[in-house]
Each structure stands twice: as C-alpha cells, then as structure tokens.
Image (tube, rainbow, N blue to C red):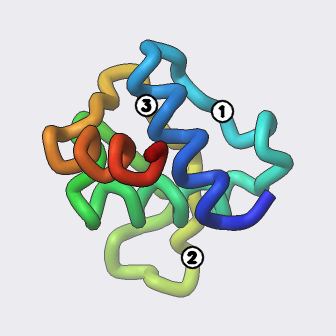
C-alpha cells in the first residue's frame, strides 16, 4: 500500500468506529506511530495517544511503546479531507 492509501484507510476505519492496528498494514510500531502522529499533527484526528519508552531527556532512546487509538475520532477537518479524497 502507498502512504496515501494507508492514510485514507486509517481515517475510514476510525470513521466507521473500528480501531485500526499496525499489523493490518504490515507496519512496524515505529512506522505506525509516524502515520498516526502525522494525522494528529495535521488535525485530521483527535484523541490519539502515543506512548514512548525512555526518559524525555534521552532523545536517542525514544522508541514507541504503544499507540492508543481507543478514543480516536475524526475532526471536522479530517471528515472533510476524507470526503474530498473519496470523491
């Protein structure tokens, strides 16, 4: 899958009340966190939590522990983006 396809699929799943998981996309947890962080930064999603290993002061040791999407929802901006992409 291309990055754009993954992004649209994640948004569709969340819109449909499904909590997507990284294994469905054959992504590592770190890659998955990058996608989710991108969607959160672009304000397509809200309610996203990414947990990291390591101390905040130890940048070199920051690795993703888990990604919590249980409360994730599309923002109005995310819904508009998805609708535009689906047309």
Quadrant where the N terminus sits is bottom right
Which mark is drawn over residue 21?
1
- Residue 21 lies left or right of residue 73; in this view the side is right
- Residue 14, percent across and down? 44, 27
* Front of the two marks 2 and 1: 1
Secondary structure, mark 3, is loop
- Crowd band around label 1 with a 10 angstrom C-alpha radius: few (<14), some (14–19), many (20+): some
Q: CA distance from mark 3 to mark 2?
A: 23 Å
Residue 24 visible in the displayed image: yes
Residue linked to disc 2 = 61
| Contact? badges 2 and 1 (CB < 8 Å) | no
- Crowd band around label 3 with a 10 angstrom C-alpha radius: few (<14), some (14–19), many (20+): some
Residue linked to disc 3 = 69
Residue 84, placed above or below residue 24 = below
Total numbered circles: 3
- Give the mark nearer the N terminus: 3 vs 2: 2
Q: Residue furthest left?
A: 76
Q: What residue lies at 58% left-to-right and 48% top-to-bottom?
A: 65
- Crowd band around label 2 with a 10 angstrom C-alpha radius: few (<14), some (14–19), many (20+): few
Q: CA distance from mark 2 to mark 1?
A: 24 Å
| Residue placed most toward the observer, 54 or 3 | 3
Q: Residue furthest front?
A: 87
Q: Residue furthest right?
A: 26
* Front of the two marks 3 and 2: 3
- Residue 69, percent across and down? 43, 31
- Residue 2 lies left or right of residue 12; in this view the side is right
């Amino acid at each position: 899958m291309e990055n754009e396809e993954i992004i649209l699929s994640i948004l569709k799943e969340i819109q449909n009340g499904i909590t997507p998981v990284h294994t469905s996309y054959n992504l590592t947890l770190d890659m998955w966190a990058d996608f989710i962080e991108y969607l959160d930064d672009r304000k397509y999603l809200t309610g996203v939590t990414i947990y990291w290993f390591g101390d905040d002061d130890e940048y070199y040791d920051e690795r993703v522990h888990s990604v919590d999407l249980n409360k994730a929802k599309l923002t109005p901006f995310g819904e508009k983006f998805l609708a535009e992409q689906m047309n």
